[in-house]
C-alpha cells in the first residue's frame, strides 16, 4: 500500500476516531489530544499495517492503547517518587480529617496497616499504588500476573477492613 492510499483510508476513518476518542475521554479537549496522538502513531507506523487486514480494528487498537498508556502515565506521575513510608493522608483518605492531630493519627494508622501486611501483599500493593502496572509488578517479582492481581486485591480487602473507621468518618 502506498502512503497516499494509507492517508486516504485514515481520513475516511475520522468519524470512528472522533466517536471512539469521545467515548474514552468524555472530554472534547482530551479527545482531540487522543485523536492527534493516534494519528501520529498511525502515520509513524503506517508501514506496519498489512493490507487486507481490518484497518478500523488496527486504528482502534492504537487509540485504545494510547489512551491506556496516557492513563497509566498520569497515574505514575501523580505518585512518582512516593513509597509506602511517604504516603500522604490526602492520597489515602477521601475526606479530610478535621485537624492536624486527627490527620497525623490517620496517616500513622494507614502506614501501620500497610506495614502489618505480609510482604507478599505489601510489596505488590505499594508498587501498584505508586503507578506500576500489573505486568510490570509481575515481571519485577517474577510472579504470574494473576497472582499479583489476587495479592493486590487481598491487600485492599485487609486494609479496608482495618481502616473501616476512616471510611465511616469520610462518608459520614
Image: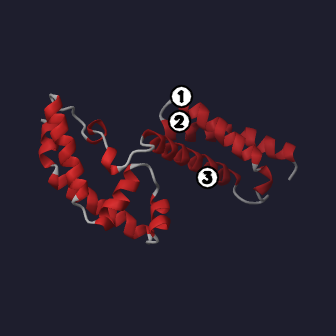
Image location of residue 120, percent across then percent down? 32, 67
User: Which sits earlier in the primary sequence, circle 2 or circle 1?
Assistant: 2
Query: How far apart are the alpha carbons under marks 2 and 3?
Result: 15 Å
The disc placed on residue 22 is 2
Q: Secondary structure at mark 3?
A: helix
Task: From the viewer's side, name the closer residue of 140 and 8.
Answer: 140
What residue did someone put label 3 on? Answer: 61
Q: Is residue 171 visible?
A: no
Image location of residue 145, percent across then percent down? 44, 67
The residue drawn where x is 14% and y is 35% is: 102
Query: How far apart are the alpha carbons under marks 2 and 1?
Result: 7 Å
Left or right of residue 114, residue 145 in this image = right
- Label pair 3/1, CB-CB below 8 angstroms: no
Q: Secondary structure at mark 1?
A: helix
Task: From the viewer's side, name the closer residue of 123 and 86.
Answer: 86
Task: From the viewer's side, name the closer residue of 104 and 127.
Answer: 104
- Label pair 2/1, CB-CB below 8 angstroms: yes
What residue did someone put label 1 on? Answer: 28
Amino acid at each position: 500500500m502506498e502512503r497516499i492510499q494509507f492517508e486516504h483510508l485514515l481520513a475516511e476513518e475520522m468519524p470512528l476516531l472522533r466517536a471512539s476518542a469521545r467515548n474514552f475521554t468524555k472530554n472534547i479537549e482530551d479527545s482531540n489530544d487522543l485523536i492527534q496522538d493516534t494519528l501520529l502513531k498511525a502515520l509513524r507506523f503506517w508501514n506496519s499495517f498489512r493490507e487486507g487486514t481490518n484497518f478500523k480494528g488496527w486504528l482502534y487498537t492504537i487509540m485504545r492503547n494510547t489512551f491506556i498508556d496516557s492513563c497509566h502515565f498520569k497515574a505514575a506521575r501523580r505518585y512518582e517518587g512516593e513509597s509506602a513510608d511517604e504516603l500522604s493522608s490526602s492520597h489515602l483518605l477521601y475526606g479530610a480529617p478535621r485537624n492536624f492531630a486527627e490527620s497525623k493519627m490517620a496517616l500513622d494508622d494507614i502506614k501501620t496497616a500497610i506495614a502489618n501486611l505480609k510482604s507478599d501483599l505489601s510489596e505488590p500493593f505499594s508498587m501498584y499504588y505508586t503507578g506500576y502496572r500489573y505486568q510490570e509488578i509481575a515481571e519485577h517479582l517474577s510472579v504470574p500476573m494473576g497472582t499479583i492481581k489476587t495479592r493486590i486485591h487481598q491487600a485492599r480487602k485487609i486494609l479496608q477492613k482495618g481502616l473501616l473507621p476512616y471510611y465511616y468518618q469520610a462518608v459520614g
